[in-house]
Amino acid sequence: MRRFIPLPGALLFGLAAITALLVAPASAAAAPQGGAVFEKCDMCHVSTDWHTMRGGANGFDHDPTGFPLRGSHRSAACGDCHTERPLRDGDCNGCHTDPHRGENRGGCDECHGTYGWDIPQARADHRRLRLPLVGRHAGVPCADCHPNDTGNEFRAVPDDCGSCHMAEALAPSVHPPHTGFSSDCASCHTAYGWRPARVAHARFWPLTGVHSTTDCSGCHENGRYAATPTDCYSCHTADFTRGHRPGDSTRCEDCHSTAAWLPVTMPNHDRFFPLPHEGIRDCGDCHPDGYDSFTCMSCHTHSKSRMDREHRGINGYAFVATDCLRCHPRGDD
């Protein structure tokens, strides 16, 4: 026969409390990530005490908590993260002080991984920022653009070209001199090198026709780029003198194009005489002495006797080169 030894009431109460603590849901235990509550204590703890984790500190399966341990997090001691402060999902700043001082928008995981702070793909990730690293910029040490940063802060810096290259652009050895030029280097240069440079010339004076293949020095003599005249006559005075008489219009573009001096197209020439006209090869055929006079007899080389005979009885007839136009305004018979 078994004998039951009665226990003191205080001891019975203590055993009941311990039993309730071990089997009751841990309703007051907040999850490490905050918010959710673990209802099964034995998912993390062993039955002997609260401090021994199932599988040991390094063997504990952290995945069910919602924050899987990867990289450097796997070797971190539990107490490094589980302090008195609450843990929030995805909040790196809860453990890691932000060296960027909030200037780099987005979470840490946009640039960093769990295996270390170094960013092996930093140049590739830079394309998400205001200044993608392409061309020569791809090989520039980070400190050249972030000279005032210490450690690995890499705070935001100006992304305009002039902030880094203005002193270089204004150096006396630079040709042409860039004094007064736009600080937007990208309007002429690319990130792959200073040369070749392509000037956005249409902003000043469009380069069309023969002008597009003319050397810069052809218009910018002695290295002068500022205040270069844009009227044709300033560059083509000698050409004008050879083909025109004093008093002719100096607006070359009225008759010529940038493709070539010839052929010439005079605007509204039909007001005087319709063009084209059979037999005319050059303006000088009708204007041998300049454009303020003309003759029809360079092509119509008829003798005066013949013309007098054919025009006998016509009122106002005279054997004068410019009078032909009065009766033949369109050059017809």
Image (cartoon, rainbow, N blue to C red):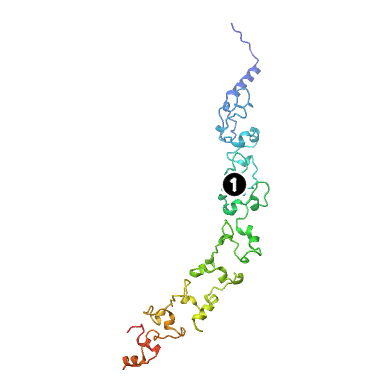
Residue 271 quadrant:
bottom left
In this rendered view, identify the residue nearer to me: 264 or 44. 264
Residue 81 quadrant:
top right
Task: Give the x, y percent position of residue 213.
Answer: 51, 67
x 36%, y 90%: residue? 303
The total number of labels drawn is: 1
x 60%, y 21%: residue? 19
Amino acid on which disc 1 is placed? Ala
x 61%, y 41%: residue? 92
Say if 231 sits above or below 30 in the image: below
Residue 6 quadrant:
top right
Task: Give the x, y percent position of residue 192.
Answer: 57, 56
Task: Give the x, y percent position of residue 171.
Answer: 66, 63
Position of the C terminus, as image quadrant, is bottom left
Q: Residue extending furthest top? A: 1
Say if 30 sits above or below 105 in the image: above
In this rendered view, identify the residue nearer to me: 176 or 73. 176
Say if 183 sits above or below 33 in the image: below
Q: Which residue is mark 1?
A: 122
Q: Secondary structure at mark 1?
A: helix
Instruction: Tell me: 319 left or right of 35.
Output: left
Task: Give the x, y percent position of residue 288.
Answer: 45, 84
